[in-house]
Amino acid sequence: MAQIMTRRLTTADVTQLQQISIETFKDTFGSQNTAENMAAYLQDAYNVPKLVAELAEPESQFYFVERSGESLGYLKLNTGQAQSEAMGPDTLEVERIYIRQAFQHQGLGNQFMAQAIQIAQAAEKQKIWLGVWEHNEPAKAFYTKWGFKQFGAHDFVMGDDRQTDLLMIKSLTKN
């Protein structure tokens, strides 16, 4: 079996990033949302200028996981002002763990989470946090398994549908 590699993205990867973002988001949430709301969200969230700006943000990091040159999914991390909520300088946000449907349940989510925690610890962050849709039971179970606990919620707008993301956090300090 070919070796799985992780590499940091640059703006040169924007087309592939856009394709994987749209594919994984539709596969995960398409059946629970209207086609109109999905199309509106995808156009807003994953257009090329927006993704280029995200890739260029110095306080964000993107990583592809690849096998034999094929991208299986990606990880997006934010610190400082790039975080989607004002959480302070001692936190790292896991904004996205997107794994293409054909490659799910192969340990890639665990690999990404371990990488996120390692990056947070190397940057001397005290906590790692994320948002997850309140109805995404597999993701909620995954994050709970990793020791995340809910601490709040915020709105997530999908087209004209206001939804709720649960905010979950994990302490990285030894008690």
Image (cartoon, rainbow, N blue to C red):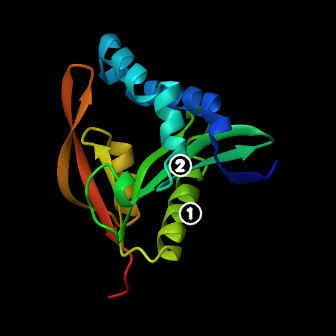
Image coordinates of residue 121 in percent, x first then y, are 48, 75
- The amino acid on which the numbered mark 1 sits, given as a three-letter code, is Gln
Q: Residues within 10 Å of mark 1 (few under 14, many from 20)?
A: some
Residue pointed to by mark 2: 75
Identity of the residue drawn at 45% across and 30% down: 25
* Image position of 99 with respect to 6: above or below: above
The answer to which of 25 and 48 lies nearer the viewer is 48
Residue 53 at x, y percent in the picture: 49, 38
Distance from label 1 to label 2 (Cα)?
Answer: 9 Å
Relative to 35, 8 lies left or right: right
Q: Position of residue 174 (x, y in %)?
A: 37, 86
Count the numbered circles shown.
2
| Dot 1: element | helix
Quarter of the image for the C terminus: give it: bottom left
Front-most of residues 117 and 9: 9
Q: Residue at x 45, y 24 (%)?
A: 26
Query: Badge 2: how crowded within 10 Å, few (<14), some, or many (20+)?
Result: many
Q: Which residue is mark 1?
A: 115
Left or right: where 141 falls relative to 123: left
Residue at the image position 59 percent from the left and 41 percent from the top:
73
Q: Quadrant of residue 156?
A: top left
Q: CB of mark 1 within 8 Å of CB of mark 2?
A: yes
Image location (x, y in percent) of residue 128: 37, 65
Q: Is residue 124 left or right of residue 132?
A: right
Give the residue at x 53% y 26%. 48
Q: Earlier in the sequence, mark 1 or mark 2?
A: 2
Which residue is situated farthest in the bottom direction here?
Answer: 175
Which kind of residue does numbered mark 2 sit on?
Leu
